[in-house]
Image (cartoon, grey):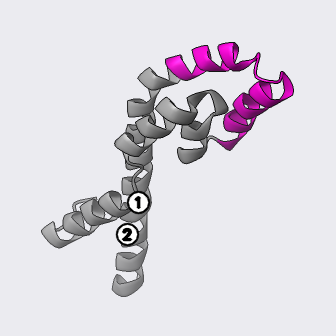
Amino acid sequence: MDLTTQEMQLVNSEVEKRKRNLVVAYLLWFFLGAFGAHRFYFGKIGSGVAMLLIVVLTLGLGAIISGIWALVDAFLMPGWQRTDIDRIERETIELLQTRNDRYTGF
């Protein structure tokens, strides 16, 4: 779909409002990474709960496993943010299409 300048500005505005902040994600990762806080922030609830349970149910001994998992996540987070941005752009464009179709009668 070809977007007008105004529609592109709307999409960019929506992305800026709704995207996950990578600085916040890395702060959560640094201070609470073994507990999966960064995963909760990105909406990866299931794996965040898994990381949290690994640490809690092993009385902290599982923090080594969870810590290694969190270390790998440090390299994955920029991709998660890009996926989040793509999803927001797609949803906003679909909403614009629906709105435009409704007004043009299609």
Q: Amino acid at mark 2?
A: Gln
Disc 1 designates what residue?
18
**37 up-or-down from 75: above or below:** below
Closer-to-camera residue (48/29): 29
Task: Name the quadrant of the C terminus.
Answer: bottom left
- Is residue 57 shown left or right of residue 28? right
Q: Toward which corner of the image does residue 69 lie, by quadrant?
A: top right
Q: Toward which corner of the image does residue 78 lie, by quadrant?
A: top left
Residue 55: x, y in percent? Answer: 75, 26
Residue 31: x, y in percent? Answer: 51, 34
Q: Is residue 46 magenta?
A: yes
Q: Which mark is residue 66?
A: none
Residue 76: x, y in percent? Answer: 46, 25
Q: Which residues are magenta?
A: 45-71
**96 up-or-down from 54: above or below:** below
Q: Is residue 51 magenta?
A: yes
Residue 77: x, y in percent? Answer: 44, 31
Disc 2 designates what residue?
97
Residue sitting at the far left: 5
**35 up-or-down from 100: above or below:** above
Closer-to-camera residue (88/44): 44
Tag 1 secondary structure: helix
Q: Amino acid at mark 1?
A: Arg
Crowd class of label 1 (few under 14; some 14 to 19; many from 20; radius 10 Å): few
